[in-house]
Image: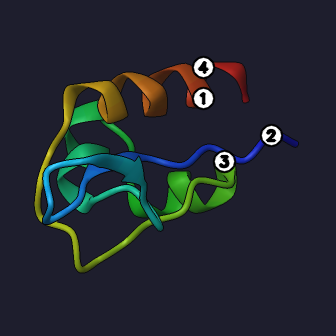
Amino acid sequence: MHHVKPTITAPNGKKKTGKGFSPNELKAAGVSKQQAWQAGLPVDERRKSEHEENVAAIKAHVKKV
């Protein structure tokens, strides 16, 4: 299975691959933490931001699964 990783903004302003999706992104996509775990999506509890491209990636991945 293809692993989905979020895109985040590093402190220096550059985009990079993150460790997991934020709880706010999961909530915006209408996915619970349990559903994310079952779909193979990583969750990073430390992140608080919400990026639209990550919400779209979550929705697309859950739709495929």
**Disc 1 versus disc 4: nearer the observer:** 1
Q: CA distance from mark 4 to mark 3?
A: 10 Å
Under circle 1, the secondary element is helix
Residue projecting furthest to the right: 1
Check disc 3: other Cα within 10 Å, few if <14, some if 14-19, many if 20+.
some
- CB-based contact (under 8 Å), mark 4 and mark 2: no
Q: CA distance from mark 4 to mark 2?
A: 14 Å
Coordinates of residue 56 in the picture (x, y in percent): 37, 22
Q: CA distance from mark 1 to mark 3?
A: 8 Å
What amino acid is found at the position of numbered circle 1 in the picture? His
**Disc 1 versus disc 3: nearer the observer:** 1
Instruction: Write down the residue under mark 4.
Output: 63
Coordinates of residue 55 in the picture (x, y in percent): 31, 31
Instruction: Write down the residue under mark 1.
Output: 61
Under circle 2, the secondary element is loop
Would you identify the image quadrant in which residue 47 lies?
A: bottom left
Quadrant the N terminus occupies: top right
What amino acid is found at the position of numbered circle 3 in the picture? Ala
Q: CA distance from mark 1 to mark 4?
A: 5 Å
What amino acid is found at the position of numbered circle 2 in the picture? His
* Residue ID at (43%, 47%): 6
Whichever of labels 4 and 2 marks the residue nearer the N terminus, that label is 2
Instruction: Write down the residue under mark 2.
Output: 2
**Disc 4 versus disc 2: nearer the observer:** 2
Would you identify the image quadrant in which residue 21 lies?
A: bottom left
Check disc 1: other Cα within 10 Å, few if <14, some if 14-19, many if 20+.
some
Whichever of labels 2 and 3 marks the residue nearer the N terminus, that label is 2
* Residue ID at (13%, 65%): 11
- CB-based contact (under 8 Å), mark 1 and mark 4: yes
Instruction: Write down the residue under mark 3.
Output: 39
- CB-based contact (under 8 Å), mark 2 and mark 3: no
